[in-house]
Amino acid sequence: MTNTRVERVDARNRYEIYVSDQADTEAAPAGETLAGFAEFSQEDGKVRFTHTVIDHAFRGRGLGDVLAADALADAAQRGDTIVPLCPFIAKYLTENEVAGAVVQWPHGAPQNAATPPEPSS
């Protein structure tokens, strides 16, 4: 059985996704492997997602979507405005709603964006 865990690591300015293989016995504890990350920068209440990577060994398992969903949900919960500079994060936002998310599209909102753009002041 494979489980995932997404963690915000402020010291590295990124959200990391870990994959653990759950062992069936206590004699063989589960190990965790860093499978990918989404880099960000944060300033003035905005979190700018700049780059997302899933290790080649873990591609094709949907981990990018898990990472994006958890990272964006965390940013929304913190009250940060999300700026999707990373193409993967931008694509995720056009296909999925993120509850409570405020998105500031760097080049205007795509017509197919699932998350409404930030209201203008």
Image (cartoon, helix red, strand yellow):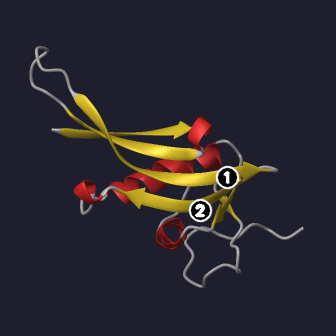
Comes first in the chain, label 2 or label 1? 1
Disc 1, SS? strand
Examine the rendered structure and indicate whether residue 16 appears above or below residue 21: below
Residue at the right extreme, as displayed: 121
x and y percentages locating residue 41 in the rendered image: 67, 52
| Amino acid type, callout 1 | Ser
The percent coordinates of residue 58 (x first, y second) are 26, 54
Q: Is residue 93 above or below residue 37?
A: below
> Residue drawn 47% across and 72% down?
95
In x, y percent, where is residue 106? Answer: 70, 74
**Three-letter code for the amino acid on which mark 2 is drawn:** Thr
State the image coordinates of residue 12 (x, y, percent, origin top left). Answer: 57, 41
Please give the count of numbered marks on the rendered protein. Answer: 2
Residue 74 picture quarter? top right
- Callout 2 touching callout 1 (CB < 8 Å): yes
| Side (left or right) of 10 relative to 22 | right
Q: Which mark is residue 41?
A: 1
Q: In the rendered view, does 31 fall on the left or right side of 121?
A: left
Distance of label 2 from label 1 (alpha carbons): 7 Å
Q: Which quarter shows the C terminus?
A: bottom right
Q: Residue furthest top?
A: 27
Q: Which residue is mark 2?
A: 50
SS at badge 2 = strand
Residue 107 - label: none
Position above or below: 53 against 33 = below
Residue at 79% across / 68% down in the picture?
119
Q: Residues within 10 Å of mark 2 (few under 14, many from 20)?
A: some
